Image: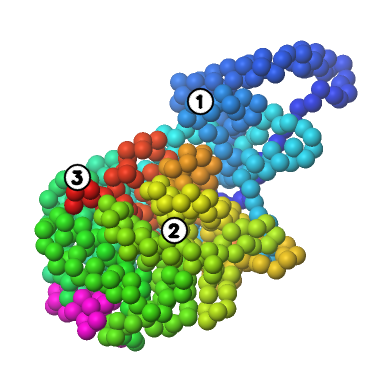
Amino acid sequence: MHSPSRKEFVSLTFTGSGNYNNKQWRRQSCWRKWKQLSRLQRNLILFTVALMLVCGIATYPTVTEHFREICAVIHSVSSVFEAFPLTCLVLQKQKRPPHKRGPPGLQNRLQKKGTGSDIQVKENPIQEAKKADKEKGEKPLMVVNYLGVCVSEFDRLEAVRDAFRHAWKGYKEFAWGQDELRPISKSYGEWFGLGLTLIDALDTMWILNLREEFEEAKTWVSTELSFNKNVDVNLFESTIRILGGLLSTYHLTGDALFLDKAKDIGTRLMPAFNTPSKIPYSDVNIGKGTAHPPRWTSDSTVAEVTSIQLEFRELSRLTQDTRYRAAVDKVMQKVHKLEGKQDGLVPMFINTNSGQFTHLGVFTLGARADSYYEYLLKQWIQGGQKETELLEDYLQALEGVKKNLLKKSSPNSLTFVGELSHGQFSPKMDHLVCFLPGTLALGAHHGLPADHMELAKQLMETCYQMYAQMETGLSPEIVHFNMHEGSIRDVDVKLADRHNLLRPETVESLFYLYRFTKDRKYRDWGWEILQNFNKYTKVSTGGYTSINNVRDPEYPSPRDKMESFFLGETLKYFYLLFSDDPELVSLDKYVFNTEAHPLPIWPSAE
């Protein structure tokens, strides 16, 4: 782990003036000759020198480490560099990693003082340098970076693969076959006892071409994975992580082992639909074949019952058994007709006995409702864009978002999505809502109005700022936006909301935005985020940990938990973001479920 430190860069501007003594005569003479050259000549010389430097580093690997302290971005020849897949970033100055185990600052338990919400909007450091010199009326010759060499897209892909290997190392050594790794205590946590992390990561390993790790996991699935257990599982989580993961891996590999396992778990989840209303219970005992709601309520969350459709529909298509699709289609048909919506927005809860919405008047695109909207669009795409009711509900909901939830912050006019409670607007936005830019972009790609893409870009900027404005460069779970005129900052974060769970939503949307626009800033933003995950959440003995405080770089307070979605989603989306291959999980052939497991778009004849 690297010790945390503040971000630094240096902008060097060379001018032709200045007083020199006799010892500087040669330097002055050379400088005058340099200034006499045309801009084109200077650019060509600088480009040649830079190219020779890069080639020299590549030719002599042993020299590479000596050049990791500096990296020049030659702005005056940026147009030339754009022809090459080479990007130079201003990264954080880092100290030598500590030899002790644990995330950054684990040994320093003194909380940093003054972590109030006094943070301004931060631009990309390179952009800040350009802006500063522009205000001075000067053009910068170069921005000096204290950390890394210029990184190619291949380097970035390898960085993601290295991150996966490191996470897998911890899981393999301390949590093999269990649900989740606890990297600080070198132990594991169980949820269902079904190897959640391993199954969630299967298709990620295949996409990242980590065949050795994949074969190890496949052997465990073949010999150890059994669903004949007296255990209660959550219908939604089991569907998106286990059923989705197995179906996706089957499609990517063609190995029938994964389809057989998918059919087994899918069949065992079906008792959840045996309710008076056909709205499924939240919990299923996959060994006994029984299902029930949570002990404290007879409600299910709307997101959970409406975000299992992609998986069960695909299971029916593959097995020719219509009961899976029939069960989940009934849920969508019922929700489509229900009263209690507001401009297409749905409440967060639905009763499994009556089939009616409960807790009326509360609307959010965050927890308990988020993936309802995502799956409206994705089911329409999956089915060949034939199910018009799904599209109608999606478009109506987006109009409801614009009318009721979409606002601008002060002072920098960041577009954000808040919440509505009985007519009262709250400027609260979950990190979960950052799925929306990607979903909007996906819809625009499939022929929906162009203004969806414009809104996607605005929200993408906001989600990036949720990272960039934090001292660690990592987003909190929840932020509150300031809307009062005269505010000095856009974002406030409450103490209880400062944790980061290694969530994927922002990286997911960066992937979609880059895939459709080819704007390199989305890759650069993703690279910054990956670097900060490595800096503040990587555990030296293996694995990554969620943290409690993104506002405290001295001691972010590790939570000792690596969620399965870090391997199943976050690292997968990083890899796809940095890949130059549009056919690597083509968005014209696949649609991702809400756990980042790609499922095929059905042929139009079906």
Q: Could you tell me which residue is drawn at 81 percent across and 22 percent down?
A: 16
Q: Nearer the viewer, residue 48 or 100?
A: 48
| Circle 3: residue type | Thr
* Residue labelled with disc 3: 253
Q: Could you tell me which residue is drawn at 21 percent across and 76 percent down?
A: 272
Position of 31 compared to 57: left or right?
right
Residue 67: quarter of image: top right
Which numbered circle lies on residue 587?
Answer: none
Q: How is the image coloured?
A: rainbow
Indicate which disc, 3 or 2, sits on the residue closer to the N terminus: 3
Q: Nearer the viewer, residue 497 or 534?
A: 497
* Residue labelled with disc 1: 83
CB of mark 1 within 8 Å of CB of mark 3? no
Picture coordinates of residue 402, whole percent (x, y):
53, 64
Position of 252 compared to 554: left or right?
left
- Kind of element beneath mark 3: helix
Task: Tell whether position 534 is magenta.
Answer: no
Q: Which residues, given as a range, are shown in magenta?
A: 272-295
Q: Could you tell me which residue is drawn at 21 percent across and 63 percent down?
A: 312
